[in-house]
Amino acid sequence: MSAEMSLTSGQQPTQSFETVAALRKALSQLPQGDARAAEAAATREGMLTKPPGSLGRLEETVAWLARWQGRYPPVMDRPQTCVFAGNHGIAEAGVSAYPPVVTEQMVLNFERGGAAINQLSAELGASMTVVPLDLSRPVRNFLHAPAMTESEFLEAFNAGMHAVRPDASILCPGEMGIGNTTSASALCLALLGGPAVEWCGRGSGVSNDVLKRKAEIISEGVERHREAIDDGLDALRILGGREIAAMAGAILAARLLSIPVMLDGFICSAAALALYCSGVDALAHCMVGHASMEPGHRRLLTHLGHRPLLDLDLRLGEGTGAVLGAILAKAALRCHLGMATFAEAGVDSGAA
């Protein structure tokens, strides 16, 4: 099956936000999912022809799908991959192995179906939405000024919300943006502290000298704006990028639309961190598909309290690890719904 491709979804979420204050209010009163649907999944799981707990995290994945879809049985018939693309002013500091024009070139590659995420989305049976965000106008270099104004931030955040299909059974957000590991590292440093070098990785494959300079730039940028950052949304506006803000918007829209989210790697998780630091249980509807090779990702997941489903040495981004996690979720649901119960199979439950 080939992945359906679109550049805009043409569908609207439950709302948009005109002010950051309204966004903060929404993060303080999020829906909590359907506990009864999760309990129904757990009840059937205990009746299936296997020892209790023998399918490990596949079992909890089905209950998670049921809770956040708000139904039992859950479905995996309309998965959606959303890839957001944005350019960064911080790239002018030489923090990447590639020039910013590569962002635009990769958007064309996504559109033509030539990237890794296209192939994995096809394997999942997911529709794929690509959202380029004002690529000709990078966000500002955060060494000199906040990356986005409030209106620019809200425009990007709402674009992410609008990209989510209300009928999606699971959302896999991803990104493309030269320089965005620098922004992600700066977000983590601003919100979680610690030495900059512990959040800083090679990104697109930079040299040791560039890596050292990258850590210095991150530290300098965060220190410049520290007094203006009170929560995750502040950090995202000041240090992030349009594609990172859009991923955060998509994650929130999914919560409001009763859609579970499978998070991708470091940059996607940094977008999620901004929500986590701005709202109680803002990531309860999320699982993490994989642990990235970016060293800051594992530290970040520890802070978020999320354990990844996979550890495959990936560091591509695009949503690839999220889609692989969703493929596992689809397999888990097939087991759950397709296996016989002890009673149906005529198997003595005491023998398992």
Image (cartoon, rainbow, N blue to C red):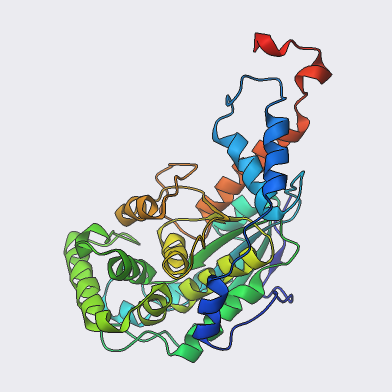
Q: Give me the residue at 29% from left, 71% from top.
A: 190
Q: Nearer the viewer, residue 352 or 135?
A: 352
Let me know if residue 163 appears in the view. Answer: yes
Q: Is residue 217 left or right of residue 2?
A: left
Residue 133 place in picture, x, y as percent: 53, 80
Let me know if residue 123 appears in the view. Answer: no
Compared with 200, 249 (above or below) is: below
Compared with 302, 277 (above or below) is: below
Q: Give me the residue at 46% from left, 59% from top.
A: 317
Q: Nearer the viewer, residue 349 or 6?
A: 349
Tell me the quadrant of the picture where the C terminus can be found.
top right
Residue 204 place in picture, x, y as percent: 35, 62
Count the numbered circles shown.
0
Compared with 115, 49 (above or below) is: above
Residue 102: image quadrant is bottom left
Q: Give me the residue at 60% from left, 65% from top.
A: 82
Residue 30: image quadrant is bottom right
Compared with 156, 97 (above or below) is: above
Residue 251 place in picture, x, y as percent: 57, 65
Q: Give me the residue at 42% from left, 86% from top.
A: 148
Q: Is residue 15 left or right of residue 137?
A: right
